[in-house]
Image (tube, grey):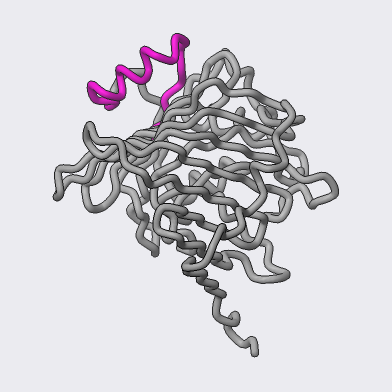
Amino acid sequence: MRLLILTGALSLAVPAGFAAPEAAPAAAPNHAEVVSAAELLKTLETSGEGMTTLRADIRYDRRFLLQGDRHVRDGSLYFKVNPGAGPSGARGRTFAIHFDELYVGDRLENDPQTWIFDGRWLTEVRPAIKRLTRREVVREGEDFDPLRIGEGPMPIPIGQKAADILSRYDAELRPQNEGAGEDGKAYLTGLKEEAWQLLLTPRKDRPDKDEFREIRLWYSKATLLPRLARTINRAGDESFVALINLERNGALPEAAFAVPEPGDAGWEIQVETLPPPPGGD
């Protein structure tokens, strides 16, 4: 799992439509007629066709079981498909997450965080502690999807195939409020729209282990855009990620994807590269 470095649970599967076409694919049902998880996943494959950008306000709400702490981060999410990039290559998809506020319990902390993925490198910037970390998550020449569900505790899986998800997870279509918990129900009420709930649990016959025990995803029934996720990891930590004020195909500020430069002396700069592939130099 190459993205275990990420600190979160952003399991919001943005509607697909960026994957290369397959021969004679089965027609996706009208999303108003969806009656099963498999149908919803198939519909999500094509619902994102024509989407080039997505912007949203984001809230990341994490509860740590053993420590009893609650951390809530608020910020902005930016996603774009870069012109000229292959439709299924990781380098065609970039994203940036800027967390401006952190509440630990009721206390506001000075710890902004920025995450920027440029198709190969993931850069984390934490000005409060003067640390900039660049991590290589895709080797040069590889066709690896860093946004794939299960690749880390903070995936933003985009452009995935239903068959891939179903090969790794048991999927169920569940009632909107089921399993959301009281806080989840409050988030859903705040959406002010009906949503599909998709429950994913790792298949027992998988050879690898998943970071999560369960993933619950909610999609707008009107737009099929992701609105809320609830995850429980193997340590029992619970996380919610809510996307608010979504804007599709709007202009994004170029500065959102620019890596901030260290402002003065005293910064710690780390660069972490992947080891050579098996059989490589």
Give me the residue at 47% from left, 30% from top: 37
Give me the residue at 24% from left, 25% from top: 181
Which quarter shows the C terminus?
Answer: bottom right
Which quarter shows the N terminus?
Answer: bottom left
| Residue 231, position as x, y percentages in the image | 34, 40
Q: Where is 122 relative to 173, above or below?
A: below
Figure quadrant of residue 10: top left
Would residue 98 be found to the left or right of residue 138 on screen? left
Seen as rendered, the residue at the extreme top is 192
Give me the residue at 37% from left, 50% from top: 203
| Residue 165, position as x, y percentages in the image | 51, 45
| Residue 65, position as x, y percentages in the image | 17, 45
In-front residue for pair 217/74? 74
Figure quadrant of residue 159: top right
Would residue 39 be found to the left or right of residue 19 on screen? left
Seen as rendered, the residue at the extreme bottom is 281
Q: Is residue 252 magenta?
A: no
Would residue 104 be found to the left or right of residue 281 on screen? left
Q: Where is 79 relative to 272, above or below?
A: above
Seen as rendered, the residue at the extreme front is 264
Would residue 96 be found to the left or right of residue 142 on screen? left
Residue range (magenta): 179-199
Give me the residue at 66% from left, 55% from top: 118
Q: Where is 196 relative to 252, above or below?
A: above
| Residue 141, position as x, y percentages in the image | 73, 69
In-front residue for pair 269/199? 269
